[in-house]
Image (cartoon, rainbow, N blue to C red):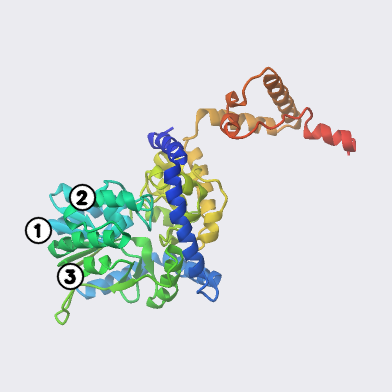
Amino acid sequence: MSRLSEEFLVSAAHKSADLTHRSTIKRNISSYDAAVAKGKTRFADFEAARARAAQVKSEGIRNLASLLETFESKIIARGGHVYWAENSEDARQYICDVAQRNQVKTVVKSKSMVTEEIHLSPALEKLGMKVWETDLGELIVQLRHEPPYHIVTPAMHLTREQIRDLFREQMPDDMTGETHQELVATARRFLRRAFFAAEMGISGANFLVADAGLVAISTNEGNGRLTTSLPRVHVVVTGIEKVIPRLQDLGVLWPVLAATGTGQPITTYSTLIGGPTTADEIDGPEEFHVVLVDNGRTEVLADKAQQELLRCIRCGACLNICPVYRQVGGHTYQSTYPGPIGSALMPIFQSQQEYGHLSYACSLCTACNSVCPVKIKLSDHLLENRREYVAEGNAKISEKIGFSLFRWAAMSSTRFALFGWIGRKTLRAGLAMGISPHALGPLANWTKYRAMMDVPKDSFRDLWRKQNGNH
């Protein structure tokens, strides 16, 4: 068992027993569920919209290389720069070089999971730069020195009182009250100084529009537009899978993303960016860079069985519906992308040995399949990862022995019947002697909160023969 696997089990047990944590998550996800249910009713046919969104993303994946080249040529023609980063280190180095070349001292970041994935902020801070997250949730977890808890709502696990106490400690000069509105105003005052001081703005991308050569960004707080327009250098950090063929495709992707991500008809700020400022424009960056991050994505692309994972639009719907995520929370996964999508992607992006255990953090209820706006069958991919995890030799010795023994017994009806008879007799004898079910190996966790099942005297085959003879 790997270190991360052991830590997952410990954290999962702790969070599952934390009733305050579970209550906070339940309340926040319940609000999300109500909003999303209402948001879907605005569609004449939401299932048709899902199907079309899946088609668009699949087309983008099938034609990934040519679409990215088209996108690149459009950006370069407008005076922008495009860099193809093979891995996290490559991406970090390029962005750090751009920052040092421009003598950057302060960086503001709009929300970007890819920058979390490549650990960009620590690399910039190591060079002496001050980096500020400007999404409210991201700022909160940054001040707490925590990673995001959720793909869409990074501070979902915190109460208003916890955020109030954090702001009193970290930004006392900007505090004027403790209502939701006053706390937001506190963060705005605090961040306004960072926006005006920053020489570099860093954003992610929701979509890369190939035929128009535009970066599409969706935000609800306005911080994205300030990040991309005020600093003199703007760097977009995005995964290569974000490319879509046509500008008109946003007509379905933007509403579907908003409906499943937050329940809105469309996000408050939907922005298209195509390059540095021109002579007749009064705002925008003087220097514009797009960093296209691979970091394991071409490995997913090459695997036909797993390829559809690249359709993901990071809406967070699978996290919110997942019964495991709702109990153990986002930080338990210890990965950039938590929940079902993270459990499917991280073993491929990183390694089965480190993150393969996440594929087992799933009840296989398939609820995530039903809510994914681009119709990814996540449960299939989690099962595929489990097969890969075992094939690479990561299973426990006890599991290997147990399943090998079961296979051997199941290959013979006589052996199977014999083992069943031995098992029944042993259990009945042990329970008759007063042995607690909690001591019975794999049954321990089951019987901790449930009554032990009655052990039948006869097998199903024996009962069948008694009732039906040998027929």
Q: How dense is the environment of label 2, judged by Cα within 10 Å: few (below 14), some, or many (20 and up)? A: some
The residue where tag 1 is placed is: 103
Q: Quadrant of residue 355?
A: top left
Task: Identify the amino acid type marked 1.
Answer: Gln
Q: Residue 308, percent across and down?
A: 47, 59
Task: Identify the amino acid type marked 2.
Answer: Gln
| Residue found farthest to the bottom | 280
**249 or 199: nearer the viewer:** 199
Q: Classify residue 227 as left or right of residue 215.
A: left
Q: How dense is the environment of label 1, judged by Cα within 10 Å: few (below 14), some, or many (20 and up)? A: few
Q: Quadrant of the N terminus?
A: top left
Q: Residue 171, percent across and down?
A: 19, 53
Residue 87 in sight here: no
Spatial distance from mark 3 to mark 1, Cα to Cα? 15 Å
Task: Identify the amino acid type marked 3.
Answer: Pro
Q: Classify residue 244 as left or right of residue 105.
A: right
Q: Quadrant of the C terminus?
A: top right
Q: Residue 363, percent across and down?
A: 55, 46
Q: How dense is the environment of label 3, judged by Cα within 10 Å: few (below 14), some, or many (20 and up)? A: many
Which of the two marks, 3 or 2, is nearer to us in this view?
2
The residue where tag 3 is placed is: 285
Q: Classify residue 97 as left or right of residue 163.
A: left
